[in-house]
Image: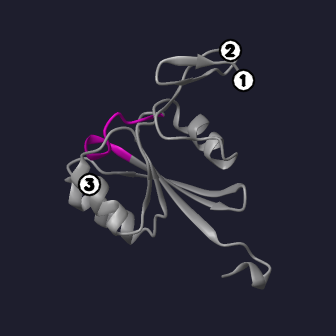
Amino acid sequence: MSCMDGVEDVMKIAIPVFENRISPRFDCAPGLRLCEIEGDKITGIKEISCEGWNGNERVSQLKYFGVDTLICGGLPDYLLGILTNNRIKVIPWVAGDANEVLTLFLRGQLNSGMVICPGRKRRRCKRGIKIQQ
């Protein structure tokens, strides 16, 4: 549907996860969190197991689920190329709690290379430099 119909488009985000954190490597993550977003609201979250899948199978599943954006830790260059060739936007080298990262994405504050640090004041780190919010 389009915005002209009075309903905003649905965006689909994928986050490779290890427990509640972004997995350090896309191609080794045991799980994948699929999030549907309308406007600035999360309308659905689904977790699937992707253990045993190789890199190409992971990309195929992202295409199957209609993923627009992948937020991930590290990934091999060849997979980055395959993802971008399939029109999947990649925000790589992100680390931290998957929910906090998704919140930053929704606010338009997530950048490649961000490390979301634990702590009471919700500090964000970028490339090892702490930035107070």
* Disc 1 crowd, CA 10 A, few/some/many (<14, 14-19, 20+): few
Is disc 1 placed on a helix, strand or loop? loop
| First-in-chain label (1 vs 3) | 3
User: Does the magenta-highlighted stretch encompass residue 20?
Assistant: no
Specify the segment rendered in magenta: 21-31
Q: Quadrant of residue 73?
A: top left
Q: Position of residue 68 (x, y in %)?
A: 49, 64
The label nearer to you, 2 versus 1, is 1
| First-in-chain label (2 vs 1) | 2
In the visual, does 128 lie left or right of 103?
A: left
In the visual, does 97 lie left or right of 64?
A: right
**Amino acid type at mark 1:** Gln
Residue in view at x 37 percent, y 69 percent: 63
Proximity of marks 3 and 2: CB atoms separated by less than 8 Å? no
Between 123 and 20, the residue placed more toward the observer is 123
Residue in view at x 24 percent, y 46 percent: 76
Residue in view at x 34 percent, y 61 percent: 83
Q: Which residue is mark 2?
A: 120
Q: Position of residue 54 (x, y in %)?
A: 19, 53
Q: Position of residue 65 (x, y in %)?
A: 43, 68
* Disc 3 crowd, CA 10 A, few/some/many (<14, 14-19, 20+): some
**Amino acid type at mark 3:** Leu
Q: Is residue 85 above or below residue 127?
A: below
Q: Is residue 1 above or below residue 16?
A: below
Is disc 3 placed on a helix, strand or loop? helix
Which numbered dot is residue 79? 3
Residue in view at x 41 percent, y 43 percent: 92
Proximity of marks 2 and 1: CB atoms separated by less than 8 Å? no
Proximity of marks 1 and 3: CB atoms separated by less than 8 Å? no
Q: Which residue is mark 1?
A: 133
Which colour assignment does the render follow? one colour
Q: Quadrant of the N terminus?
A: bottom right
